[in-house]
Image: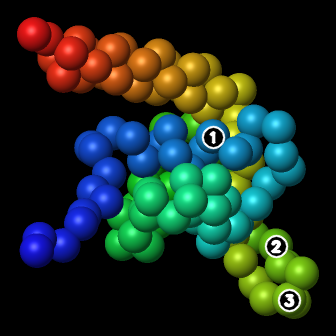
Amino acid sequence: MARSRNDILQGTLALLVSRPWPTAAACTATRSLRTSRRVSADLLRVEEGSLYPGLHRMAQEGWLRAEWGVTEKNRQARFYAITRAGRTQLQREEESWARLCSGVRRVLEYA
């Protein structure tokens, strides 16, 4: 039997990792990963090899603010917070995802 894969479509990383942040304070990448996995019932997995370059790119674009801080376990970590530009981009990503889902749904329902 083929092994099930949970590949993330290209371009959805920004949507998945920044979605928890519009209403929350800055958080670490690890916390964002845990949140995405928990909320998706562990169906969506973003690998660290994709996450950190993605976060770096989003910070360069101005969508996230990154700063060093100390975790509750007294460890140094980068904390990320979504910016106003990031919230605008997140809205665009959500609209794009909704269009994609609609198109896929139409093809699957085609008789």
Q: Is residue 68 above or below residue 10?
A: below
Gap in Å between the C-alphas at discs 3 and 2? 11 Å
On the image, which quarter does residue 28 sit in?
bottom right
In the structure shown, which secondary structural element does the residue marked by tag 1 occupy? loop
Gap in Å between the C-alphas at discs 1 and 2? 21 Å
Q: Is residue 92 above or below residue 71?
A: above
The type of colouring in the image is rainbow
| Residue at figure coordinates x 89%, y 81% from the top left | 72
Q: Residues within 10 Å of mark 3 (few under 14, many from 20)?
A: few
| Residue at figure coordinates x 27%, y 57% from the top left | 7
Using the rendered image of the protein, determine whether residue 16 is visible from the camera's viewpoint: yes
Please name the amino acid that badge 1 sits on.
Answer: Arg
Q: Position of residue 99 (x, y in %)?
A: 35, 14
In the structure shown, which secondary structural element does the residue marked by tag 2 occupy? strand
Residue highlighted by disc 1: 19
Number of the label disc, if any, that sits on residue 73: 3
Number of the label disc, if any, that sits on residue 52: none
Please name the amino acid that badge 2 sits on.
Answer: Gly
Number of the label disc, if any, that sits on residue 69: 2
| Residue at figure coordinates x 51%, y 55% from the top left | 55
Mark 1 or mark 3, whichever is nearer to me: 1
Mark 3 or mark 2, whichever is nearer to me: 3
In the structure shown, which secondary structural element does the residue marked by tag 3 occupy? loop
State left or right for residue 97 relative to residue 1.
right
State left or right for residue 62 relative to residue 81.
left
